[in-house]
Amino acid sequence: MTLFAHYGYAKTNIGDIAKECCMSPGNLYRHFRNKQAIGEEVVREYMASEQADLELIADKPGIDCETRLHQFFQSNVGRLMEELRTNPKLIELAQMIMDGDSGILAHHIEWKRDRIIAMLHEGIEAGRLQGDPAAMSCVLLDMTRGFLMPQALAQMDFDKVPARLDALLNLALAGMRTTTDGP
């Protein structure tokens, strides 16, 4: 991660990685088939840490589902913005994952979708929301895609992102509320 953040994915080579790990390139190849496999593992580690943080939000007791959904998305996007501020060259790693066929991104999106479905289902059971949780989760993920893609997020004014994301979530959730529910 340190080398990819400093030099970028494209300019980091197996020799650099092996040296940083205090091993020979041959020994590194015993553990990883190529640089892409190392990059994928770096992304898996990041996503596992992110998922652990988001689980805490999704499972917070005593907080309504709409508040948790806001916190879930704001935390996810906030973490990504901080990573991009600190390590802007990591966009190359994100692009490698998007261009590849490892399934990492699809698995991560599916995990998020499942967590969002669970929160939406709670809102429906509480009588605050209506609709199909699976369809509504897809709508929320589609609407927030630009905030969740490092390449798109990097082009935004980070100071305005939290307010823009909240406005988008408010709009989406307003459309999902029951007709008897207030603002």
Image (cartoon, grey):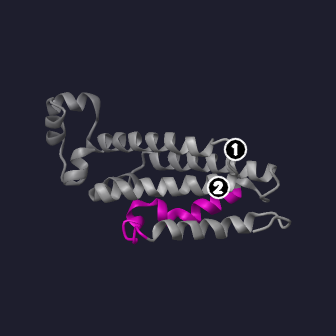
Task: Name the residue at the right extreme.
Answer: 180
Q: Quadrant of residue 160?
A: bottom left
Label 1: which residue? Answer: 62
Residue of label 2:
67
Query: Residue at point 18% right, 53% down?
Result: 11
Q: Position of residue 105 (x, y in %)?
A: 47, 49
Q: Is residue 21 above or below residue 1?
A: above
Camera-side residue of 167 and 41: 167
Q: Residues within 10 Å of mark 2 (few under 14, many from 20)?
A: few
SS for callout 2: helix
Question: Can residue 150 be found in the magenta stretch?
Answer: yes
Q: Residue at x 13, y 36 (%)?
A: 19
Residue 92 can be seen in this image:
no
Sequence order check: which comes first, mark 1 or mark 2? 1
Secondary structure, mark 1, is: loop
Location of residue 53 in the rendering, given as x and y in whole percent from the top left corner: 50, 43
Q: Which residues are magenta?
A: 135-159
- Residue 141 inside the magenta-drawn segment: yes
Q: Is residue 95 left or right of residue 141?
A: left
Residue ID at (77%, 58%): 129
Q: Does residue 36 appear in this view?
A: yes
Residue at image location 20% in from the left, 52% down from the top: 6
